[in-house]
Amino acid sequence: MLIDQFPAIVVAAPLVVAALCAIIRRETACWLLALVVAFLSFVGSATMLGQIQEYGEPLSYKMGGWAPPAGIELRVDLLSGYLLVLVSLIASAVLIYGRHSVRSEIKKGLRGLYYAMYLLCMCGLLGIVITGDAFNAFVFMEISSLSMYTLIALGKDRRALAASYQYLIMGTIGATMYVIGVGLLFTITGTLNLVDMADRLGPIMDTPAAIAGMAFVVVGLSLKIALFPLHLWLPNAYAFAPSAVTAFLAATATKVSIYLLMRFIYSVFGFGFAIEQTLIPEVIMVLSLVAIFAGSFSAIFQENVKRMLAYSSVAQIGYITLGIALANATGLTGSLVHIFNHAVMKGALFMLVGGIALQIGTVRLSDMAGVGKVMPLTMFGFVLGGFSMLGVPGTVGFVSKWYLAIGALENGWWWVVALLMLSSLLVLAYMGRVIEVAFFRERPEGAAALKEAPKSMVMTAWVFILACIYLGFDTSFTVGVAEQAVDVLMGGAQ
Amino acid sequence: MPLLAGDVEGMDMEGLNELAFVLGGVNHWITVFLIMAGLYIIVSRSNMIKKLVGLSIFQTSVYLLYVSPGKIIGGTAPIIIEGAEDQLYSNPLPHVLILTAIVVGVATLALGLALVVRVNEAYGSIEEDEVYSDGDWN
Amino acid sequence: MRGHLILRVVSKLLIPFLLLFALYVQFHGDFGPGGGFQAGVIVAAAFVLYALIFGLQAAQKIISPALLEVAVPLGVLIYAGVGVLTWSLGGNFLDYGMLDSHDPSHGQHLGILLVEAGVLMTVSSTMLLIFYAFAGRGR
């Protein structure tokens, strides 16, 4: 049956088309090919997710016909299916969105190669999610990271080069830490298959080698996630990358690493050990809370709006990891829901800012005075996105914060709930600053006439903004899948 | 030789164990040294190329970490030869994994160096202090 | 490089053997240590030696960067093409056993050979492209 081949198709198709794009190099042809393959990946992922929901069985694919645990297994369960849908959806949307901004930001001869790199990056991100093999995940991680560094370095500003270099150093340290951890676990278990590794680790989890391996994996992935205080690469990388790349990166890259961290903590090391017998939840909780406040405070003082949103991402990542640290079903649900919700709302906000960057040429707050009057559609979308970040009821931000708060209360941590409320005020401060400048200040005398960004950009961003509101009312997809995925995570452990 | 035998009996077994711990794990000590040396170079140098050298050393530690436990003394390549099917062989999997990791390392190094070349062209310097202090990063 | 008579003669002697050794490593991959990665690097080393002795332009006259830029993705396509072929024969991705309908082990030999050819192509042209990119910079 064809659906049996879907796991391989979803990853291999972007790889093949990336190679094709690198040969063809014509902008329009590459864009069309990329769009088709990204959309096909999305359809494939959604079909697989539907299939798994219906039958309740994870899909397992034997690469090259070699049976796991010896062979590499591609494994799609509810959790990875959920992330696959997210990544391929964002990838397709950003392709539609990015057509104009790529034209204005990237040199003519490089655009075909840009799409090739974009597809490689997408292939890597999908691969991390879909693979059931710890080392294979490292290879896919490096595929996505290397192409990501290249994409960031394509930014117009020369600071993009330095930001990309900084990310390369930090990202490689993170990936190498991860692979050292996997090496230690491999030496004591003799297997790389995640399911098999979990089985074999069970009785020897409290040996020094296993604990050291766990520490390396957790720290390495935390670097990739940009968990405070390992987040220093993130603001520069997001601020100086081309707009389309930023939207894609912000919505997917860190999320995929969070997925891998969840897999390791809950499925491989196991709830009973990693959560109950180590300090991992306490450490992650403290760091998450610090991330929420430090990220939001830094965001308030940024002059560059993309950098402001990047610092806000650091804070939002804090919410997601907080759910991991809460370590109960409700908190984890909140975490998983926020992965999707944050991708949708931050993707939309970066898309809108990209539109502004295209029209006025900068993203500095002082240059955005009065933009709300000449680009009402863009700025109105920004306001709605801001509401969603704030967690106003009826938006997605509210849904995930609600689950996180309930999860914290279940643990009896009422002070975490208080801190969550307080952190929303900070969001109001930094989003409010942009809105104040854009709507309540006059455009400077003699400023060039402005109009809305191209339709394809505004429309794509608005689809996401509307999704923010729709998913705020109808939570059956996000919360529904997340709750089932949490059962998979917690069920594997108990 | 009673004197010698007495010496061995009287010897501190714990001391022997410690010696075995130090010598037996010599590959791991080298791995740890490479990890620390690499990280130290990355943290302490501000020259971008030296940082990449540190990164390379850091990655090299992984190769040793994987390959050394896979080696069995007296083991050969895992190829079945007729007549000698039950020969002792080393586990090939770590080598294959590290081949991949080496390729990843080469790719990372090449990309990093390419970025440094571009940084040098754009800034006229490859000292991090000068590159990052230059201009407004906000 | 008009001078360096000895270097030129010796490298002219060496390069054919380097390429031959690369082919040996490539095809010996079935029976012993070897394969596309190692062979690709040796091939690239031969051309790098040529470029060092006779100059970058002479090397680029033999293999132009434009050709290499096509060869890199083409190697990936050969690799993935084998995967697609095994799909069309009803197997899993890269299930080489499908390539021969009578004896799966023959199919596996064939599959490895094809895949390694793709790897050789991509690795050698990538290494050479990296060399060209750095050597040709700032001239």
Image: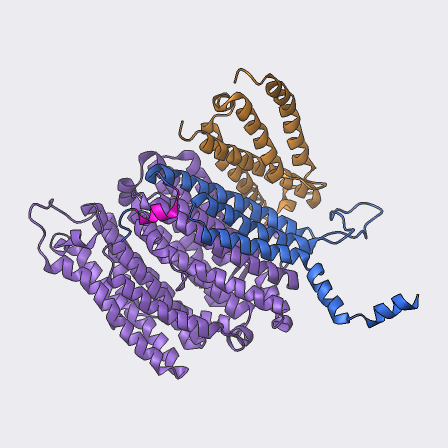
Chain colours: A purple, B blue, C orange
Look at the magenta stretch and give its main secondary structure.
helix
Residue C50 as seen in the image, left or right of residue A321:
right
Outermost right residue: B1
Q: How many numbered tags mark residues here? A: 0
Outermost front residue: B3
Could you tell me which quadrant the C terminus of chain A lies in? Answer: bottom right
At which x and y percent is residue B67? Answer: 65, 52
Outermost bottom residue: A412
Residue A372 as seen in the image, left or right of residue A287:
left
At which x and y percent is residue A474? Answer: 31, 70
The one of A394 and A273 positioned closer to us in this rendering: A273
* Residue name at image x 57 percent, y 46 percent: B102
Residue A478 makes an appearance in the image: no
The one of A201 and A451 positioned closer to us in this rendering: A201
At which x and y percent is residue B56? Answer: 53, 47
Residue A60 as seen in the image, left or right of residue B10:
left
Q: Looking at the rendering, which quadrant does residue A300 occupy?
A: bottom left
* Residue name at image x 66 percent, y 26 percent: C17
Which stretch is magenta? B126-134
Please tell me whether residue B132 belongs to the stretch shown in magenta. yes
* Residue name at image x 35 percent, y 38 percent: B124
Please tell me whether residue C76 belongs to the stretch shown in magenta. no
Q: Looking at the rendering, which quadrant does residue A45 occupy?
A: bottom left
Residue C15 makes an appearance in the image: yes
